[in-house]
Amino acid sequence: MRRREFITLVGGAAVAWPLAARAQQSSPVRRIGVLTPLAQGDPEGQARDVAFRQGLEKLGWTVGGNVRIDYRWGIDNIEKANAATEELLATAPDVILASTSRVIAILQQATRTVPIVFTMIYEPVKQGFVQNLAHPGGNTTGFTAMEATVGAKWLELLKDIAPQVTRIAFMYSPDNPGPMQASRSVEAAATKYCGERSQGPDS
């Protein structure tokens, strides 16, 4: 599946639940708040915006017609996330869409009533964002990028491609707990696929 098709599918499906739940409210225009770490002029950010709008249109939501999107771009630190969350909540959004663990945590602290939809979040259950994948509970739902055991699968695929490999390096940001969980899965599988267990990540 091409990137744009995937984003359209995720974007459209992600907002369908909370928007449909409020479809009978009196306000003719629904508001979607979007918090993204990408800069406004970033080509990837613009591509996602276009795909998101197209996904909405397929569900009958037209920007400038019955729905409005309020973007907050470049949310790449806690200070910006706190400020942007406060700004968006002041607009009384019908739903907020976000894609980083840091922002989801801030949103959940700020509101328990406004629906929150996440995309590409690692291990949302372990991070405490939802109760479980089948029944998220609360006001938060969305799509997970992966779950911890996928790390072992990566290692298995790597060995299928390059069976001579016996040592690997796993790099990730310590600010993102998802890949850290995957790294532990890789470490646990190292004995089986590489013949020895790694010493674990330093950071």
Image: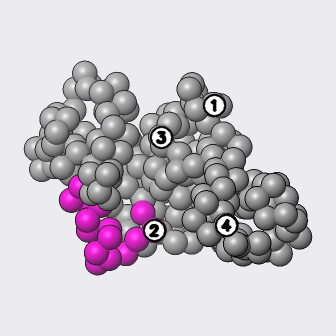
State whether residue 140 is above or below residue 145. Answer: above
Task: Report the span colored magenta.
Answer: 36-51
Asked whether the beta carbons under mark 1 and mark 2 sit within 8 Å of each other, the answer is no
Asked if the residues shown at circle 2 and circle 3 are in contact, with their CB atoms under 8 angstroms apart, the answer is: no
Q: Is residue 200 visible?
A: yes
Find numbered disc 4 in the image and state the secondary structure of the residue it sits on.
Answer: loop
Q: Earlier in the sequence, mark 1 or mark 2?
A: 2
Q: Which residue is identified by label 1?
A: 132
Residue at 50% of width from left, 37% of height from top? 141
Does the magenta portion include 77?
A: no
> Image check: 176 left or right of 23?
right
Instruction: Indicate the amino acid at tag 2.
Output: Pro
Are the residues flagged by discs 4 and 2 in contact, CB closer than 8 Å? Answer: no
Q: Secondary structure at mark 2?
A: loop
Amino acid under label 3? Gly
State the separation of the CA atoms marked 4 and 2.
37 Å
* Type of amino acid under label 4: Pro
- Residue 201 in picture, x, y percent from top left: 81, 71
**Gap in Å between the C-alphas at discs 3 and 1?**
11 Å
Residue at disc 1, secondary structure: loop
Q: Nearer the viewer, mark 4 or mark 3?
A: 4
Q: CA distance from mark 4 to mark 3?
A: 37 Å
Q: Nearer the viewer, residue 118 or 179?
A: 179
Q: Amino acid at mark 1?
A: Asn
The residue pinned by badge 4 equals: 163
Question: From mark 2 to mark 3, how far is it between C-alphas?
Answer: 17 Å
